[in-house]
Image (spheres, rainbow, N blue to C red):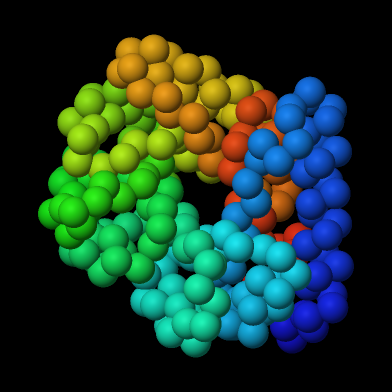
């Protein structure tokens, strides 16, 4: 059963408090981390409740689901939509119109398709890195990231990197992967001359560790919305 509006607002405040505490521990500036609410499978009324509690950034995994929610929430003019799931090239045109940021760019072909879909303005993207070399996950291998960025720069606006670490027994399992992504970003920024200022890493189970390792975007769903509806 979806949570009521008051409970979503309470949980959102609790996550914000945890983000602020993690920033303080890491010596990070206040407001240096953006919270993206992972709203996959959540009904529009849950998104609206979080919006009314002050959230503005929402992450969806599937293009059609996002389109349905955007239609249901069309009165919320300043909401920002992030695609945080894999994007097939044949859906690039629809996604380029639907999302403010694509956090899952993983191929030159996809970058070129996004550029064709929105030639008048470069679409902001993050390059998805498959840190663990997992066959079950999309993303470019770390050693292929520089070539990908060089091939799509000027066609899309590359803001930084995104990754999901392999599953593990607890938040500390993710720490070395987050550190690797931060180090990779630093090397890529030096090699390409791009700022690559965004690091999207950390979810409900490990977002505080991600902040301690330099995350600028965390994607949190379950801690705010509860368990996903089946």
From this viewpoint, is residue 44 visible?
A: yes
Q: Tell me what residue is drawn at x 47 percent, y 17 percent.
A: 186
State left or right for residue 135 relative to residue 205. left
Residue at 66%, 40% in the rendered image = 33
Q: Which of the 4 quarters of the picture holds residue 4?
A: bottom right
Taking the spot 17% from the left edge, 59% from the top edge, the residue there is 117
Of 196 and 182, nearer the camera is 196
Residue at 52%, 83% (x, y): give it: 75
The image shows a total of numbered marks equal to: 0
- Quadrant where the image shows the N terminus: bottom right
> Where residue 135 sits in the image (x, y, percent)?
39, 43
Evaluate whether residue 174 shows in this view: no
On screen, residue 178 above or below 205: above
| Above or below: residue 51 compared with residue 114 | below
In the foreground, 43 or 138:
43
Q: Position of residue 101 (x, y in %)?
A: 41, 53
Depth check, front residue: 121 or 143: 121
- Quadrant hosting residue 209: top right
Percent x, y for residue 7? 84, 75
Give the image quarter of residue 148: top left
Q: Quadrant of the C terminus?
A: bottom right
Q: Decide if residue 57 is on the left or right side of residue 52.
A: left
């Amino acid at each position: 059963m979806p949570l009521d509006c008051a409970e979503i607002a309470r949980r959102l405040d609790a996550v914000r408090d945890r983000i602020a505490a993690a920033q303080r521990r890491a010596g990070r500036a206040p407001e240096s981390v953006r919270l993206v609410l992972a709203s996959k499978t959540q009904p529009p009324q849950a998104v609206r409740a979080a919006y009314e509690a002050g959230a503005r950034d929402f992450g969806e995994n599937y293009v059609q689901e996002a389109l349905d929610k955007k239609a249901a929430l069309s009165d919320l003019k300043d909401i920002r939509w992030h695609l945080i799931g894999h994007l097939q090239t044949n859906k690039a045109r629809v996604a380029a119109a639907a999302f403010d940021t694509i956090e899952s760019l993983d191929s030159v072909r996809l970058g070129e398709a996004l550029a064709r879909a929105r030639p008048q303005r470069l679409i902001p993207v993050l390059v998805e890195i498959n840190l663990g070399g997992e066959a079950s996950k999309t993303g470019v291998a770390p050693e292929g990231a520089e070539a990908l960025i060089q091939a799509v720069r000027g066609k899309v606006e590359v803001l930084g990197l995104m990754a999901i670490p392999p599953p593990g027994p607890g938040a500390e399992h993710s720490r070395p992967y987050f550190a690797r992504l931060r180090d990779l970003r630093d090397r890529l920024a030096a090699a390409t001359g791009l700022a690559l200022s965004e690091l999207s890493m950390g979810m409900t189970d490990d977002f505080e560790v991600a902040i301690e390792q330099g995350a600028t975007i965390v994607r949190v769903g379950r801690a705010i919305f509860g368990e996903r509806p089946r």
